[in-house]
Image: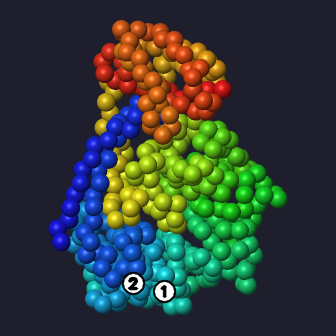
Amino acid sequence: MMMRILIYTILILFSFCAKSQIITVHELPDSIFVGSLGSVMLDMTVDNNNEIWLATEGGLSKLNENYEVVEYYSEANSDLPHFYTQALAVDTFNQIWIGSAGGVLAEFDGNSNWTNHSPYYDVTGIKVDKANHIWFHGWTNGIAQYDRTGFNWYNTSNSNIPSDYIYDIEIQDDSTIWIATIDKGIAKFSKGIFTVYDTLNSNIVSNVIYGLEIDSNNYVYCGTDKGMCYYDGEQWHIMETLNHDYCIEKCQPLFVDSDDYLWITANELSDRLFLRVKGENCMLIDEISFRPNTAHNTPIIEISSNKFITFLNNFTSIIELDFNTSINKLDVSDKLHVFPIPSTNKIFIKSEIKKMTRVEFYSLKGMKLMEFKLNSLLDFKGDVSAFWPGIYVIKVTFSDDSEAFKKIVKY
């Protein structure tokens, strides 16, 4: 079947930065899901040739840069150990590492040579360090390392790892392994020693850890069932602004990009959010039509500067997010002032550089609540007394058609 490509251009009106995003949806052919338990992608990676590898419930697929399927591997046509593939990684030799639900850890050269590593089965996550060593884990069997000569396996029977139930692992500076457990907090493994951080000895908000990410400053971010925290090298801190503003219940940090933005998927009451965060700069990306799922191994991959790919929430399509396209001629985010915050009835907006032609108020769901057309003003006063207490987004359009966004809190 020929690949069907649907292209949607969506301006996300409720983002917190002065940019627009081009969202391209690539729908995958039904043929790669033949024999699957369902039409679901479970993991994704990009190799050194910029080819995309997909783990599905029916096998392993390789796509080219145009998202066209060029190869499909199953138990019937290859030595793939099990059809239910669920974890992927690429090492520096361009070897593809595959974890599956019912088979052992597999290594594939991308052509015809397969190596299956027994007894390491039901692998749900794989990471590669700078020494090209392979670290991996399952749901219930601790973590393991392949150092190119043999395997080292760490579980509660042979080590001080606090739990065998592992959700995620991350590698820091090639010498420290951070481990997210499902029930016993966070473990740091360095120089053969496990250090445990839990609610009894640190400021993490929960012992249920859904994921870990590390930025270029070596800050370690963790997502829990009660919000986000980060470790600055000395102690853990609660990300109170993020947790409070979005009423986060369950969150999973997915990825840190080359600009040190942290990508997060999170639940807010009954809704799912997709966030891009750096410090106090938080962008809410459309949580309705293309949010990632909170399942394990939901990947986001940076394929070029400010361009990313991830799964559509129907798990049968890939979406491409392009943050290079900007509709702004001048960034005025630091020259646009909104006060008071929090507000009760009146809100004041002052622009120091450009004249305003429109002011719009949106809910966090993207619903437009009010709109005011202005006659090229530098100052604006609005009445928000009719709004329920909560968080809202103001979109300001200027005389040169550029835009800026500001967040307000209504009491």
In this view, 312 is above or below 243: below
In this view, 330 is above or below 216: above
Circles 1 and 2: CB distance less than 8 Å?
yes
- How many numbered circles are shown? 2
The image quarter containing residue 187 is bottom right
Horizontal relation, residue 131 to residue 218: left or right: left
- Residue lying at 56% horizontally and 84% vertically, measured from the top left: 151
In this picture the colour scheme is: rainbow
Secondary structure of the residue carrying tag 1 is: loop
Tell which circle, 1 or 2, labels the residue nearer the N-terminal end. 2
In this view, 209 is above or below 391: below
Q: Which residue is mark 2?
A: 83
Image x and y of residue 204, in percent: 73, 54
Image x and y of residue 308, in percent: 37, 52
Q: Which residue is mark 1?
A: 102
Pick whichever, 138 or 192, lies toward us.
138
- Residue lying at 18% horizontally and 72% vertically, measured from the top left: 1
Q: Residues within 10 Å of mark 2 (few under 14, many from 20)?
A: many
Horizontal relation, residue 216 to residue 290: left or right: right
Image x and y of residue 333, in percent: 46, 24
* Type of amino acid under label 2: Phe
